[in-house]
Image (cartoon, rainbow, N blue to C red):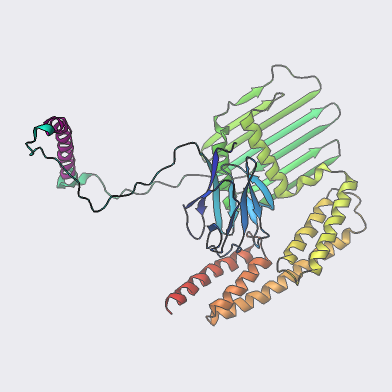
Amino acid sequence: MTNHQTFMLTIEAGPCRAGETFVLTPGRPQTLGRSSDNPIAIPDPLLSRNHCRFERIGDALWVIDLDSANQTLVNGLPVARKQILPDDIVTVGDTRLRVTAADAAVAPVTEVASVTGVAPIIDLGLNTDSTSAAARHNLRPILYTVAAIVVLLLGATLIMTSPDSGSRPTNLPPPPPRDETLQIIYEKIEASSEAVFRYEFTLSPDRVLAVRIDDLSQNRSIRKEKTIAPGLIHDWVRTIESSGFLSLDPAYLATSITRGAIESRDLTVIIGHRVHRVRVSNRKDPDVFANLRDKLETFGLSELGFWALQYSADKLTELGRDALLIAQKRMNERELSYGNIASAINSFREAEVCLETVDPKPAFFPEILSGKEEAIAELTRRHKEYRFLADRAINLENWEAARSQLRVICELIPDRSDDRHREAASKLLDVEKRLQASRKNR
């Protein structure tokens, strides 16, 4: 990536302005948000007024979350500050944007201004001035060619509109939707005479992500699974298809194996009816393969919380205690920000995950469990309260009050996969439309 690259953002999906592209001007940070003061202003109700900022740092493009209520996601994962690359997906509110890049050295498209007030001069060859005879002579072949093209076009139009042409249907049915059912099976094995490590990643057609890790050196064997959001499937299909993986050879095998050491990676991807499998054994991964498997491993570890396996029991205990202190601080500050209770729940869960593989559990572990339950109960109580206020305002057609309460719910429960957040977001879109209609009728 060099300074000659120009980055662009294209809205792929969202409540408004789908298909619109924004050019990120080099040398100047550009903010994105709901407010019209932003260089990238998108009237998505779930955006914060100033949601995030795009900034060039050296040759790289970065996105920085501006402490938004509903977070900034890159490829489905929330970020505070992250470098983004072409074909990455940035999700803000209900709006999904794709990052693309173009070479700025390509000549820009120039808009041609129309000339008005001057009638065009057309020489039909009627002028007898001898000085223009040569010009008229050179013009005649062009005029004859243009006339012939016009006659051919008229003939084609008459044929296509004649009664005999009715045998060809004019309203063809749309093509069937492309089958994007996705299945992934990935296994990595690293074995020596001292240790064996096995990592297994599977994604089933019904969107169940499962990861299993067997690490004999630390005597750990863990398996987790969860159902991921439907939108992530589409993003992963696009990522795999654009990665070049489907064009790789099926096998990259070493001619000889180092005694006592085995390193193998086996990845199978099924998209609809397309199946492609690549195996690499005891040799360096092709770059395309390495990039894709790194993304899969990172996604699996982050989605299921397996990152803790890289630390010792003492370090995990320390991390668990730190997460507990943060959770308790967020609960003590729950009146300062609607999102603090959800943040506290996440920190309690993080502390619990840190200690999942620690045995025996430290003395403060019961505080984590009781604190988490207390925070969940408090969040449930507040959600019921604000939902009642929002529904009452909707029934009274007090759209301003309804919008305010629904926005509180979206900040209170920022997880967009939560049914409570989705319900509030759906109602908020409807209330926004009613507000706009009432303003037009004034």
The secondary structure that most of the magenta stretch takes on is: helix
Give the vertical position of 124 relative to 69 (above or below): above
Residue lying at 75% horizontally and 49% vertically, measured from the top left: 305
Relative depth, front residue between 431 and 8: 8
- Rendered residue at 42%/78% (across/down): 441
Kindly identify the residue that appears in the image at 20 percent across and 49 percent down: 119
Residue 331 coordinates in the image, percent (x, y): 79, 67
Q: Position of residue 83 (x, y in %)?
A: 65, 45
**Which is more toward the observer, 169 or 327?**
327
| Outermost residue to the top | 255
Residue 313 drawn at (x, y percent): 89, 46
Front residue (pair 189, 100):
100
Relative placement, left or right, of 250 versus 336 is left
Q: Is residue 76 in view?
A: no
Camera-side residue: 352 or 193? 352
- Quick check: 118 above or below 67? above
In the displayed structure image, the side of residue 101 where residue 351 appears, left or right: right
Direction from residue 195 to residue 62 in the image, left or right:
left
Q: Is residue 99 above or below residue 416?
A: above
As for residue 154 lying within the magenta part, the answer is yes
Percent x, y for residue 437? 45, 74
Is 21 included in the stretch rendered in magenta?
Answer: no
Q: How many marks?
A: 0
Q: Is residue 212 at least partly visible in the picture?
A: yes
Of all residues shown, which one is farthest toward the bottom?
396
Quadrant where the image shows the C terminus: bottom left
**Rendered position, 420 above or below 220:** below
Q: Quadrant of the N terminus?
A: top right
Q: What residue span does the magenta drawing correspond to?
A: 132-158
Decide if residue 364 is on the left or right side of residue 203.
Answer: right
